[in-house]
Image (spheres, rainbow, N blue to C red):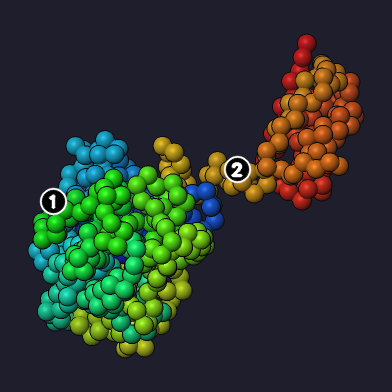
Amino acid sequence: MNLPKPKKNELMFLPLGGSGEIGMNLNLYGNSGKWLIVDCGVTFGDPIYGSVDISMPDIVSLENSTESICGLLLTHAHEDHIGAVHYLWPYLKCPVYATEFAAEVLIRKLKEVGLEDEVEINIIRIDSKIKIGPFDIEIISMSHSIIEPSSALISTSAGSVFHTGDWKIDFNPQIGEGINKKRLVELAKENVLAMVCDSTNVLVNGTSGSEEDVIKPLTNIIKECSGRVFVSTFASNVMRLNTLAKIGLSLGKKVALVGQSMWRMVEIAKQSGYLSDLPTFISERDIKNVEKDNLMIICTGSQGEPRGALNRIANGTHRDASISNGDSVIFSSRVIPGNEVSISEMQNRLSELGANIIESSKENMIHVSGHPAREELSQMYSWVKPKTLIAVHGETRHINAHVKYAKEQQINFAIPGRNGSIIQLSPGSPRFIGEVEHGRLIVDGNDLITRNSEVLKKRHKMMFNGSVFVVLNVSEDFKLINDPIIMTEGLAEIIEEDDPEYFIKSFIKEDIKPYYKSKKFDKSYIKESMTNSLKRIIKAQYLKRPVVRLELNLMK
């Protein structure tokens, strides 16, 4: 179905991304003929196509309704909430609303694609009120693993909904205001129809922990390390960077930054009024001028990203930083699902270089998550007391577990968010009322293509099965004028008794003979028939299904 036009007495919710996967969050709220978008993010990689670097929600369902989109509200600056804006804004063309820090992150992305002068960006303040179309919105301070995280109380003539964004309960996040418990408790008296809530850590018992909790363990570990100390964390986690820098300075170490994204986040944070109490960091080029025992290096690449700083250091290809025997590498981060293999391979290379690898554990908690565990979810329910819980931001198993847990916590209505499914929150009881077209868009060079694109399917097929290209020059009676030209890539190893190109050439010479002097079949039929025969024989010989292209040239 097309995107509906909600009436004044209707309040609708529609997730197009982030409900059924980790990342690429994009949600819409509808009222009085208008739609408000909340967040517009990417995810890295794809569970099906290993060659894909960046994916985002497909907004095909919005193409014919862009005039009804009144704005895009960003809850914070993480890539899974902000990273698709510069790709999708040309199709949305709506005003953007973001805090100063998120706006600065976005502006740099827009400059990369020449849109910095086209996008209307409205700076919003934490704990303020704004109006976007028919939506009255209160921006409420939250805690998360980034500067200026916010939630939104979205009020309309048809009722109010509380959109949590990404959050955790942390009253001392080291930077920023932390979660506004006072205002959240007040929401219980304001008849909130529904709470749309983060499900990422619903399978984790207890609490996520405070940023304050990592200070002592990190201090003790770094204090005991000899040689250079490398600490890898997420570049966007400015609070952790601030914590690490202060620990290093307290231990008399000079602190260096390695990784462009780390330097960029520090620059944006300072421009937004943060990190003003920290001295200048050691540049990458000056690392070699600092004694090993007197240096701590904070670097990117904790997930084993191929171009990440730590991976390049592990490979010995970083221009300025290197690992030597006795150095320590501390991972102050979590393993994002899907990155286990790349992280393990990188750690093995670091170990081969003689590095001491340290990860977070129950005994040494050197990382805390930015998402709520079960006790925090229960606490939030008791503060806000929503009539309905809509579980979003997570894989299907997380969302379904969140629905079950919310019901156990006496929330009468708990509904799983599903990409493409429209939930009507009012009038009446919350319920699914329809589904719009949805999916994934893939960044392919300078283009955005759908996950169902034939280009992507063929590329994926070639990656696992190879390709075969055949050129046949034939006379008008379909006799071969010269030997077939055969080119194969990635089909099979050439061994003494089996050369794939020789095998295909021999087969082609025999397969074309029945068509000599043919008057019954035309060129198109012969080409298709021989292509299909070639596919069958390759499958039988090599158990592969390569991309096969056969060209038949009639020579006069």
Q: At label 1, which amino acid type do we have?
A: Gln
For the N terminus, the image quarter is: bottom left
Mark 1 lies on residue: 271
The label shown at residue 239 is none
Q: How far apart are marks 2 and 1 (CA)?
A: 46 Å
Please give left or right for residue 504 compared with residue 174 in the image: right
Q: Would you name the residue on which mark 2 appears? A: 458
| Above/below status of 441 relative to 75 | above
Tag 2: amino acid: Lys
Residue 178 in sight: yes
Residue ID at (34%, 56%): 300
Q: Quick one: label 2, few (<14), some, or many (20+) residues within 10 Å? A: some
Q: Where is residue 280 in the image (x, y as percent from the top left)?
A: 16, 53
Q: Nearer the viewer, mark 2 or mark 1?
A: 1
Query: In screen coordinates, is 438 left or right of 139?
Result: right
Q: How crowded is mark 1: few (under 14 residues within 10 Å), some or many (20 or more)?
A: some
Image-based side of 225 in relation to 266, left or right: right
- Residue 274, above or below 413: above
In the image, residue 485 sits, relative to residue 111, either above or below, namely above
